Structure formats: structure tokens, C-alpha cells
Amino acid sequence: MAAVSSLSAEAARSFELRHGKFTFHVTVGYYSEDDSVGEVFIDAAKAGTELEAYARDLAITFSIARQYGAPLDVLAHALTRENDGSPSTILGTVADKLMREKKPAP
């Protein structure tokens, strides 16, 4: 399966999120054709830590899945959850935020 359309350099936004006791810097890139999520970058507050490496690798894997057509809701649903339904990882927190902000299909 080939990767879908190209990402727009102009259509990206950054924000900070907390997960557990850590703060992460997140950048989301969107496809210019439909404003859907195409890539995610996650950096931890402390560069060079094992936590940051895990966060970056999760984001890369998530981005590749999106670029090859994996639906955002499927990815969000597949991520590990706590007993109360809250996300177990920073990627789950990011995915939940993106799902809340997702535009309804026409």
C-alpha cells in the first residue's frame, strides 16, 4: 500500500500536553487536502532521556500508520487504556485530543 497524499508544511500546530507527571511538546502536521492528521512529533521536556526516546518512537510509528491510511479512530482505540478508560501513554493522550478535535465527515 502506498502512502497517501503529501503533507502541508503550513498546516501544522504545536501545543504542550501533560501526561502523568511529565510535560510533552507536541507538533501535529495535517494534510492540505482534507486537514486530517498526517504526522505527530512528541518531545519530552528533558532532551536525551529514555522517556523522550520512547515518546519520539511512538510518534514516528503513529505517523507512519497515518501516512499509510490507518484511521485515526482505529489507532486511538487500539492504544492501551487504564481501568477508568484514560490513556496509559502520552500517545494515547495525544490521540484522544486529536479525536476530540476531529472534524465530522461531510
Image (spheres, grey):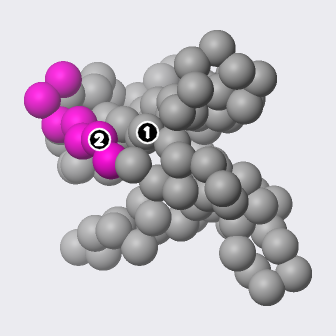
Residue 67 visible here: no
- Residue underneath mark 1: 25
Whether 98 is drawn above or below 57: the answer is below
Residue at image location 41% in from the left, 73% down from the top: 100
- Residue underneath mark 2: 14
Q: Earlier in the sequence, mark 2 or mark 1?
A: 2
- Quadrant of the image containing the N terminus: top right
Amino acid type, residue under disc 2 in the picture = Ser
Residue density around tag 2, few if under 14, some if 14–19, many if 20 or more, within 10 Å = few
Of residues 14 and 103, the one drawn nearer to the viewer in this rendering = 14
In the picture, measured across the screen, residue 89 lies left or right of residue 13, that is right
Residue 37 inside the magenta-drawn segment: no
Whether 29 is drawn above or below 16: the answer is above
- Quadrant of the image containing the C terminus: bottom left
Residue at image location 79% in from the left, 68% down from the top: 81
- x, y percentage for residue 60? 59, 26
**Dot 2: what SS?**
strand
Of all residues, the one furthest to the left in this rendering is 10
The total number of labels drawn is 2
Residue at image location 33% in from the left, 68% down from the top: 101
- x, y percentage for residue 92? 64, 57
- x, y percentage for residue 28? 36, 40
Kindly report the distance in space between the C-alpha atoms of the residues bearing marks 2 and 1.
7 Å
In the picture, measured across the screen, residue 43 lies left or right of residue 48, that is left
* Residues marked 2 and 1 touching at CB (< 8 Å): yes
Amino acid type, residue under disc 1 in the picture = His
Of residues 6 and 37, the one drawn nearer to the viewer in this rendering = 37
Q: Which residues are magenta?
A: 9-15
Residue density around tag 1, few if under 14, some if 14–19, many if 20 or more, within 10 Å = some
Of all residues, the one furthest to the bottom in this rendering is 84
